[in-house]
Image (cartoon, grey):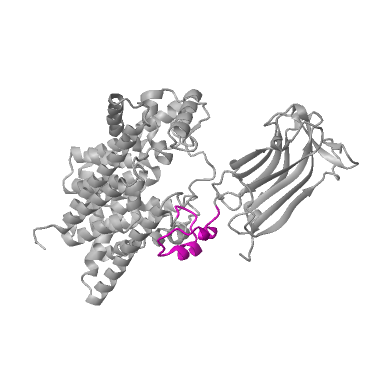
Amino acid sequence: MNRNISLSKLVLGISCLAIIFLSFRNPPPKPISWDVLGYYLYLPLLNSYGEFNDSVYNSLKTKITNEYNLSSTLYQAHKSPSGKYVIQYSLGLSYFFAPFYLIANTIASYINYPTDGFSEPYQWAIHLGGILFTILALIVLRKFLLIHFSDCIVAIVLFIVVFATNALVIFTSNIGMPHHILFGLYILLIWITHQWHLQPNVKKSMVLGLLCGWIIISRPTDIVCLFIPLLWGVADKATLKAKLKLIQSKWNYVVLAIIFSVLPIIPQLIYWKHNTGNWLYYSYVNPAEGLDLFAPYTWKFLFSFRKGWLIYTPIMLFAIAGIIWSFKKQRTWFWMLASFFVINLWVVSSWTCWWYANSFGSRAMVQSYAVMALPLGVFIREIKKHRPVVIFSTFIVMIFFLLLNIFQTWQFFKGILPSDRITMAYYLKVFGKTIYHGEYDNLLLINRDQLNEVIPSHVKYEETTLLYENFDSYTNNILNKNLDSSSQSLLIYSGYAFHNIIQLTYDELTQQKEYAWIRTTGKFYSKNMHFLKPGEIYLVNEFYFKNKRYKYRAADLTQYVVDTLGHWFQFQVDYLTPEPRRTSDIYKSYFWYRGNDTIFVDDIVVKKYIPSSAD
């Protein structure tokens, strides 16, 4: 090989070509969908729709769900206590999307596409912008790494980050996701932090502050980015004193950086104030999700076959080893790296939905690869100083992890490895497989996204009766003599619209199994059944976390009315337990009557079905 050829530049070129090729494997793209749509929604609302009221919400919902099929619902926004709608996600990523949105808006008007923010020109603009930003980020990462490592080491690090981690999926099929954009922003932050510490000035201070504020308002849990400039160059007491002295002597630049870090956040505060009446607003209204900082799911996050970070990106074990090694070999990075890694891992593994939905491996760690590239370089540099047998063994394992990631990424795109619900049994069955085998699907975790919840007949369950109530022992005034016997039945009327059936904890229902089905059967009657309208009598199943409701299902019992004759109608309603926020969460079931007449119910049976131990 010609010694004038830079190996790292060659790897960079290969990486960029691979990203471009894979990004266009299934055109046309729809990056503006699902969660990305929530981050992007600020732009079309600001430009075309005005005040986010009921009319705009309904119009957007129809356009997004029916016309463009970008999301099954408009879950990305909700009505705030003030009565106005508010977007669930923070607006930081809309800064990134803005220039591409404006370009697409101009193009769409010239080529007669709808200028609504969602048509093809906008989709392609975000897609192409994301690809360009990834390429820019890798260029800057290479430039920074060459300051500290040899060209060969930089080449290896770049190749690992792109091809040996789950970032490959994010870079090519999840363009526009916050992890993808934040990966680039973190690289720019590392670069400007390095430059600021060499020679601080006004321009660098402004950029440093803007990047910190931009990252934080893009994804508030990434406030851990502050460890990068705060602990940069701190190795011991002497360097800590030197850092404090630098801050003191350059206090004007530090203040400038702080001011500029606030600027990207101000529009968010104004938006919250305008739409909610409060300067600060917690926009994640789903009580089933949230941060449990004092009860993190770190072990599952790292090693679960469902989404374990080190199961699907095992090569990052070497980066973790590099952090440890940097204590002796690159001390000026150690405290920054260790603090960032530990706190970031703690925060992302504290999210109750720790598997982060549809992704290959743990997508929440992808942005951190910008930082983890540093200890990865340290590890490779130091391992090269060991005996040949150690070097050879290490690189054989690295190559295996690299090939494993490429192969499993291919399996992911082919649907052999699903984006969620993987178990150890399923993983071992499909390991090395090149063809999808549907017969293994029964080894997956249960699909909680099914629209029509009906207990499957092909699965073995242990059945337990939780409640049988014929109301014969009741004596209070809400009871009435049964119409066709001497027994009693429950009377529900407009003044007594709700009647509780049963209440249990998730643990009591599932007995530490993955899930439980709940089946409620019974019968109901109305003297004026021909007046009963759809939606007047419901059987409700729901869960509560700290008195906040989630997994709400209201089954309209009028669907069981087969004619208008005045007699009893049988009903049967199945309900699948959700992923709980905590296993102590409360399950409730009750009748909800919305009519103006009276309804009789009787012979209520509630049974639970948990997976058989024999399976």
Image side of residue 338 versus residue 79, left or right? left
Compared across the picture, whether 16 is left or right of 510 comes to left
594 lies left or right of 451: right
Q: Quadrant of the N terminus?
A: bottom left
Which residue is found at the position 78% from the left and 49% from the top?
A: 468
Residue 44 sits in quarter: top left
Q: Please name whichever residue, 440 or 84, is drawn nearer the observer in this view of the structure.
A: 440
Residue located 30% across and 49% down the image: 22
Residue nearest the observer in this picture, 190 or 415: 415
Q: Position of residue 476 (x, y in %)?
A: 84, 38
Give percent across and percent down for residue 335: 30, 57
Does any portion of residue 150 appear in the rendered image?
no
Q: Up-down: is 60 above or below 383? A: above
Residue numbers of the magenta segment? 418-446
Relative to the observer, which residue lies in front, 93 or 375? 93
In the displayed structure, 61 sits above or below 552; it is above
Image location (x, y in percent) of residue 547:
61, 42
User: Is residue 218 rendered magenta in the image?
Assistant: no
Residue 14 visible:
yes
